[in-house]
Amino acid sequence: MNNYEAMFIFKPNIDEENLEKEIKSVEQAIKINGKGEVKYDNLGKKTMAYEVKKFKEGVYVNYVFTAQPLAIKEIKETLKHKDDILRFMFLVKGR
């Protein structure tokens, strides 16, 4: 079991209701494949260092959770086709 931190960047033009749905769907995907509690922090809209899919800004949401290394692949597969997610990255914490 590893502790992970994941950063998701959502499209900046997403409305609040859909943003909450997307945040919860990511949380569900992590819970299904991971273990224990999932904590997240909505960091709000920020300017990105470079354009991604023609967007200069994105809504950043940080997740902290525990999972097996193989679960990360499953989480990525579940979420990679979501339209409102511009980018995501997983990091192992505490190494």
Image (spheres, helix red, strand yellow):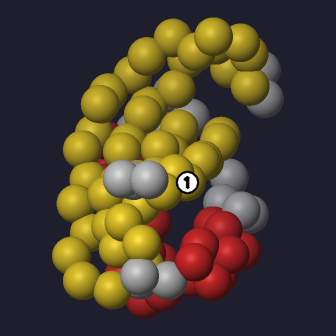
Q: Quadrant of the N terminus?
A: bottom left
The spot of residue 32 in percent (x, y) is: 43, 89
Few, some or many residues within 10 Å of mark 1 (<14, 14–19, 20+): some
Question: For this rendering, which residue is in front, 34 or 26?
Answer: 34
When the figure is inspected, residue 69 is found, relative to residue 87, above or below; the finding is below
When the figure is inspected, residue 35 is found, relative to residue 50, above or below; the finding is below
Furthest residue in direction right, as rendered: 53
The spot of residue 55 in percent (x, y) is: 68, 20
When the figure is inspected, residue 69 is found, relative to residue 50, above or below; the finding is below
Residue beneath label 1, please? Answer: 90
Based on the displayed image, in which of its 4 quarters is residue 64 positioned? Answer: bottom left
In this picture, residue 68 sits left or right of residue 31: right
The spot of residue 40 in percent (x, y) is: 26, 53
Q: Residue at x 35, y 74 (%)?
A: 66
Question: For this rendering, which residue is in front, 5 or 16?
Answer: 5
Q: Residue at x 36, y 66 (%)?
A: 3
* Disc 1 secondary structure class: strand
